[in-house]
Image (cartoon, helix red, strand yellow):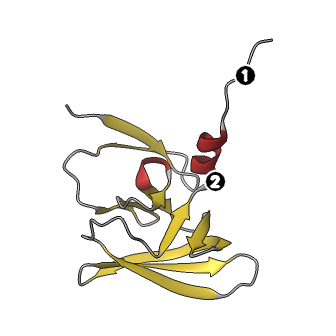
């Protein structure tokens, strides 16, 4: 069954409507919007938007980062990120076709994390 998803980008107020069934793990929608379907990309619909803030978990360290660039080469995806606090710029990478449960880093959007913390109001 095909599902159509409507996604709005924070950088672009127009919407992306796309059927995600049958897509590759890495898809470029616009110059600033990429869908990276890996288990440790914790964003709505696995979308990453350039120049947006994310939380990066690496080991026991959590940092606020801004995504500066994303590209792929030879089966790997590369993400250029800037630590918002220190201004240090790094590139993190991962094998796109990796299907295991082990990961070295994770990116999460604030909107995605807010959906995890929503609780139901209990009537008294």
Q: Earlier in the sequence, mark 2 or mark 1?
A: 2
In this rendering, the answer to whether 81 lies above or below 121 is below
The tag on residue 33 is none
Q: Nearer the viewer, residue 84 or 60?
A: 60
- Give the quadrant of the N terminus: top left
At 42% from the left and 48% from the top, the residue drawn is 45
The residue sitting at 48% across, 61% down in the picture is 48
Total of numbered circles in the picture?
A: 2
The 10 Å Cα crowd at callout 1, few under 14, some 14 to 19, many 20 or more, is: few
Q: Position of residue 122 (x, y in %)?
A: 73, 19
User: 60 left or right of 19?
Assistant: right
Q: Position of residue 19 (x, y in %)?
A: 27, 42
- Give residue 86's quadrant in the image: bottom right
Between label 2 and label 1, give the one nearer the viewer: 1
Above or below residue 55? Residue 94 is below
Quadrant showing the C terminus: top right
**Left or right position of 113 against 96:** right
Label 1's element? loop
Residue 105 is situated, as x and y percent measured from the top left of the image, at: 50, 73
Read off the residue under disc 1.
121
Residue wearing tag 2: 110
Q: Residues within 10 Å of mark 2 (few under 14, many from 20)?
A: some
Q: Residue farthest to the top?
A: 124
Q: Nearer the viewer, residue 79 or 7?
A: 79
Of residue 51 and residue 82, the one placed in the foreground of this image is 82
Give x and y (percent) for residue 27.
30, 61
């Amino acid at each position: 069954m095909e599902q159509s998803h409507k996604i709005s980008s924070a950088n672009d107020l127009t919407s992306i409507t796309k059927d995600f069934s049958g897509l590759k793990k890495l898809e470029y929608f616009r110059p600033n919007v990429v869908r990276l379907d890996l288990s440790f990309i914790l964003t709505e619909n696995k979308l990453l938007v350039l120049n947006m803030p994310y939380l990066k978990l690496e080991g026991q360290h959590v940092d606020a980062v801004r995504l500066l660039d994303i590209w792929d080469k030879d089966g790997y995806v590369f993400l250029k990120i800037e630590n918002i606090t220190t201004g240090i710029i790094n590139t993190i990478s991962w094998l796109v076709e990796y299907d295991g449960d082990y990961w070295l880093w994770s990116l999460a959007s604030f909107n995605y994390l807010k959906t995890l913390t929503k609780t139901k109001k209990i009537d008294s």
